[in-house]
Image: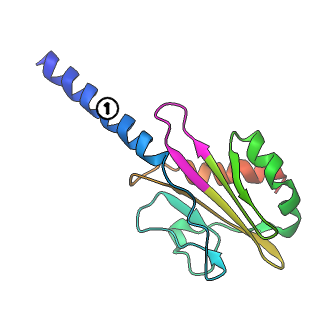
Amino acid sequence: MVFGILGLAVLGAAGFFVLGLMSQNGEAPGLVQGQLAPCPDSPNCVSSETGTVAEKATQPLSADAWDKLPEAIAAQGGTVTSASDDYISAEFKSAIFGFVDDVEFRKAEDAVHLRSASRVGYSDAGANAARVAALRGALGE
């Protein structure tokens, strides 16, 4: 019985390890028709883009936040992977299994829209919403 439970625990940890490795391949979805990509059906995404369902919706950042984003991302442990005049993408990696989440920002006329989503899996236990809240705090929003 003990060996069976131990075997299941090892198998579960191995599964998470493989998912973590899988998430390290890929990149942020980028802009789709001038907006950040819609969130998937899974609950592991938050976005400020118009049309986002209420349970995944978050408020955009102020327009003043744009120039501070790279520093705030780095301070929160992220790495900027792409930057242009109106778009920034960054990756955040979890400490234990190395899961990668993409965080994207789109500069609009009066705000900065954002999207934070897991690359793999279904639930994120609120990690993306917490990341957005931490970035807001780092930006003084």
Q: Position of residue 95 (x, y in %)?
A: 55, 32
Identity of the residue drawn at 55% across and 50% down: 101
Place residue 42 in its image quadrant.
bottom left
Up-down: is 64 above or below 139? below
Q: Is residue 70 left or right of residue 50?
A: right
Q: Position of residue 29 (x, y in %)?
A: 56, 65
Place residue 5 in its image quadrant.
top left
Identity of the residue drawn at 41% across and 46% down: 22
Element class at badge 1: helix
Pointer 1: what residue? 14
Q: Position of residue 12 (x, y in %)?
A: 28, 33
Of residues 51 and 38, the one drawn nearer to the viewer in this rendering: 38
Q: Magenta residues?
A: 92-102
- Verify whether residue 139 appears in magenta: no
In the orientation shown, which residue stands out farthest toward the left? Answer: 1
Up-down: is 73 above or below 109? above
Q: Is residue 77 left or right of residue 56?
A: right
Identity of the residue drawn at 50% across and 37% down: 98
Q: Is residue 13 left or right of residue 114?
A: left
